[in-house]
């Protein structure tokens, strides 16, 4: 059975066929690093991760690229509002680059705790200004731009396919009647490629360009960086559904205008939102929940991952502590089922279980096939979880084969079943306790309280937990 994905471009399920056989170029929009990621943002990255792990499961060689936005993103995606990075730096009394460095590290600390694999290429906007300028020059040479009020704009009227991704073109009347009109725009749907004078005289970071000293609009970074690393046409692009109408629509217009090639991206994959009651969660709005909040409330980051996998990525998920507790209990019960299978496999002279050997048991194969079919059906993780449960509950599968199959499934779902199975340290600490201390130590390090950081490392070591600091944050294991 081939892998099928829902393609926002065209709004239907399609069989996935990459441009180059066996290889996939994938770009997922990354974080704007002006604050911690909230658990809604993290849903987007869990979705990217499931997509990548599924593609790899089916033998594709994937190049996963993700940007880190550290310049140019305004609170309105359509060039309105404050500059998120500048505002955050002012509020915190730090430089933009300090804020970016701090929240980038915090982001990878969160994604690491959620067992989200680090993308193959992580690229910062501020390190790719020359690539953006080069692309803007091509767009300009192709006749799609105009200068107004010192800024360079993309003229959407020149691009007849504008809006194909997000359905109807933006309602011009509605746009024109908004309170915050940009008088420099011919059409309120036009967007800035390069800012010089219209806004933010206090912009912290500026660069020279053919249009004057200034800084890029937000959308251009994703076009320039994705094409730099994946080529002028590539396979999959993703992000949350909020990006369809403006950000991704603008990315397509400027990329295809610049290269003259169509389609720029073959498959567009968008995750629905995680919502709190009736409201969407936003980093710039009032209350938002971080992964650390969940850890402090006694949850393991993998409880949250399990919770997310219980919903299909194209359905909205409502977050509540009750439903997260349900996921926590389900994960505990899964692990305790696996522990008894483990015991049985040892009792049956099974010895150590290797994840490398393919299960030979026919009884296990039925469940693996159901699991694979679920993921091939537009990444249906709820059904994949049911297949995992079906396996675990099937007394007819020999224990060793059952464990091997479960570990394979756990690998694709990123649930670290093998590690979690033996997840009580000799000192009696469970994962949630360890995670809380690891997070406290990251906070101590960030505040340069190295004495406390060392104290925590020592205390964990005494209870059988070893820490290793690496580029993706701190990873830990039971020693
Ligand atoms: P940002 O850092 O604001 O650019 O957002 C990072 C990613 O999170 C983007 O792909 C957004 O579409 C996505 N996102 C934002 N809020 C939510 C939410 N509540 N649920 C799911 N995804 C979200
Ligand atoms: Zn983007």
Image: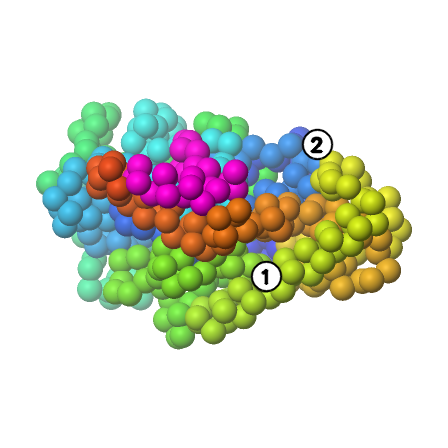
| Residue 453 falls in image quadrant | top left
Which label number is shown at residue 34? none
Do callouts 2 and 1 mark residues in contact (Cβ within 8 Å)? no
The reply to whether residue 27 is visible in this rendering is no
The reply to whether residue 354 is visible in this rendering is yes
Q: Is residue 473 magenta?
A: yes
In this rendering, position of residue 313 left or right of residue 85: right
Crowdedness of circle 1 by 10 Å Cα count: few (<14), some, many (20+)? some
- Report whether the residue tagged 1 is closer than 8 Å to ligand 1: no
Magenta region: 453-479
Which label number is shown at residue 331? 1
Q: Secondary structure at mark 2?
A: loop
Rendering coords of residue 156 (x, y %): 37, 47
- Of residues 286 and 171, the one nearer the viewer is 286
| Residue 132 falls in image quadrant | top left
Residue at image location 44% in from the left, 70% down from the top: 321
Question: Real-space Cα distance between discs 2 and 1?
Answer: 37 Å
Rendering coords of residue 395 (x, y %): 82, 62
- Of residues 455 and 238, the one nearer the viewer is 455
Which label number is shown at residue 21? 2
Rendering coords of residue 44 (x, y %): 47, 52
């Amino acid at each position: 059975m081939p892998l099928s994905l829902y393609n926002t471009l065209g709004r239907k399920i399609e069989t996935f066929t990459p441009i180059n056989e066996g290889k996939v170029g994938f770009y997922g929009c990354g974080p704007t690093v002006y604050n911690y990621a909230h658990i809604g943002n993290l849903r987007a990255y869990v979705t990217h991760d499931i997509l990548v792990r599924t593609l790899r499961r089916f033998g594709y060689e994937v190049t996963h690229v993700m940007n880190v936005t550290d310049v140019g993103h305004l609170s309105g995606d359509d060039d309105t509002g404050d500059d998120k990075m500048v505002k955050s730096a002012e509020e915190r009394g730090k430089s933009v680059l300090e804020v970016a460095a701090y929240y980038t590290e915090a982001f990878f600390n969160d994604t690491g705790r959620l067992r989200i694999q680090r993308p193959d290429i992580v690229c910062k906007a501020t390190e790719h200004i020359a690539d953006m300028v080069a692309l803007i020059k091509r767009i300009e040479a192709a006749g799609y731009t105009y200068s107004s009020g010192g800024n360079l704009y993309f003229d959407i009227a020149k691009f007849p396919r504008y809006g194909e991704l997000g359905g109807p073109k933006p309602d011009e009347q509605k746009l024109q009647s908004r309170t915050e009109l940009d008088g420099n725009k011919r059409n309120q749907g036009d967007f800035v490629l390069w800012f010089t004078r219209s806004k933010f005289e206090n912009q912290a970071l500026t660069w020279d360009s053919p249009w004057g000293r200034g800084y890029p609009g937000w959308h251009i970074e994703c076009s320039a960086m994705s094409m730099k690393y994946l080529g002028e046409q590539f396979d999959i692009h993703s992000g949350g559904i909020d990006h369809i109408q403006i950000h991704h629509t603008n990315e397509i217009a400027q990329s295809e205008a610049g290269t003259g090639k169509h389609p720029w991206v073959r498959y567009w994959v968008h995750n629905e939102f995680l919502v709190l009651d009736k409201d969407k969660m936003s980093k710039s709005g009032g209350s938002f929940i971080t992964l650390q909040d969940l850890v402090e409330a006694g949850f393991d980051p993998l409880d949250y991952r399990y919770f997310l996998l219980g919903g299909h990525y194209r359905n909205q998920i409502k977050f509540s502590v009750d439903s997260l507790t349900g996921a926590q209990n389900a994960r505990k019960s899964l692990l305790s089922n696996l522990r008894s299978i483990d015991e049985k496999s040892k009792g049956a002279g099974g010895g150590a279980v290797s994840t490398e050997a393919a299960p030979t048991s026919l009884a296990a194969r039925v469940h693996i096939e159901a699991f694979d079919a679920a993921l091939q059906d537009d990444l249906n993780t709820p059904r994949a979880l049911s297949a995992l449960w079906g396996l675990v509950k099937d007394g007819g599968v020999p224990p060793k084969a059952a464990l091997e199959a479960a570990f394979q499934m756990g690998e694709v779902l990123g649930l670290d079943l093998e590690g979690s199975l033996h997840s009580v340290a000799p000192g009696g600490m469970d994962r949630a306790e360890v995670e809380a201390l690891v997070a406290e130590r990251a906070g101590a390090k960030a505040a340069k309280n190295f004495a406390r950081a060392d104290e925590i490392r020592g205390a964990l070591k005494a209870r059988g937990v070893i820490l290793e600091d690496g580029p993706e944050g701190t990873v830990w294991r039971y020693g």
